[in-house]
Amino acid sequence: MTNPNVALEVTHQRDRPLCRIRGELDIAGVATVRDALRAFLDVGEEAIDLDLSQVEFMGAAAIDELVRAHNNGLRMKIVDASPAARRALDITAIEAALDESPTRSRQKRL
């Protein structure tokens, strides 16, 4: 399901996909992100860069989708973030864990 309030653009930089996300990542808009993250996993991507500089709102549902994709094996590095996205990332303190292998980040929590 796509949402007109969310847009994604995927390019490749440094031999790694760069996914630029624009819009409101609320409960309605997060489906677009979920579908994109699943598509990365479906084609065998293990690591992507995320540009969140154009995200106007980032709610708990978006954080949940990032964590879910990470737990399914997708490493993500945040290369830029808007103030709204930065606030959500800082509050949840998940940014560093997203770019680690899922097994390694689970071991750190134990």
Image: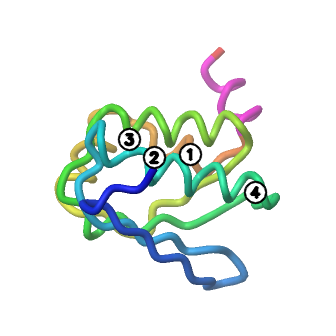
Tell me the residue at 50%/42% (across/down): 66
Judged by depth in the image, the label closer to the viewer, 1 or 3, is 3
Of all residues, the one furthest to the right in this rendering is: 44
Of all residues, the one furthest to the top in this rendering is: 110
Q: Which residues are magenta?
A: 102-109
- Name the mark on residue 95: 2
Seen from the viewer's position, the closer of residues 103 and 34 is 34
The residue pinned by badge 3 equals 62
Left or right: 70 in relation to 6: right
The kind of secondary structure element at disc 1 is: helix
Q: The residue under label 1 is which amino acid type?
A: Leu
- Name the mark on residue 98: 1
Judged by depth in the image, the label closer to the viewer, 3 or 2, is 3
- Residue 52 position by quadrant: bottom left
Left or right: 14 in relation to 27: right
Rounded to the nearest angstrom, the CA distance separating label 3 from label 2 is 13 Å
Judged by depth in the image, the label closer to the viewer, 1 or 4, is 4
The kind of secondary structure element at disc 4 is: loop
Q: Going from the N terminus, do you reach mark 3 or mark 2 first? A: 3
Q: Going from the N terminus, do you reach mark 4 or mark 2 first? A: 4
Rounded to the nearest angstrom, the CA distance separating label 1 from label 3 is 13 Å
| Dots 1, 3 in contact, CB < 8 A | no
Q: Position of residue 87 (x, y in %)?
A: 21, 46
Image quadrant containing the C terminus: top right
| Dots 1, 4 in contact, CB < 8 A | no
Q: The residue under label 2 is which amino acid type?
A: Glu
Q: Residues within 10 Å of mark 4 (few under 14, many from 20)?
A: some
| Up-down relation of residue 94 to residue 109 (above or below) | below
- Name the mark on residue 46: 4
Judged by depth in the image, the label closer to the viewer, 3 or 4, is 3
Residue 107 lies in the magenta-colored region: yes
- Residue 39 position by quadrant: bottom right
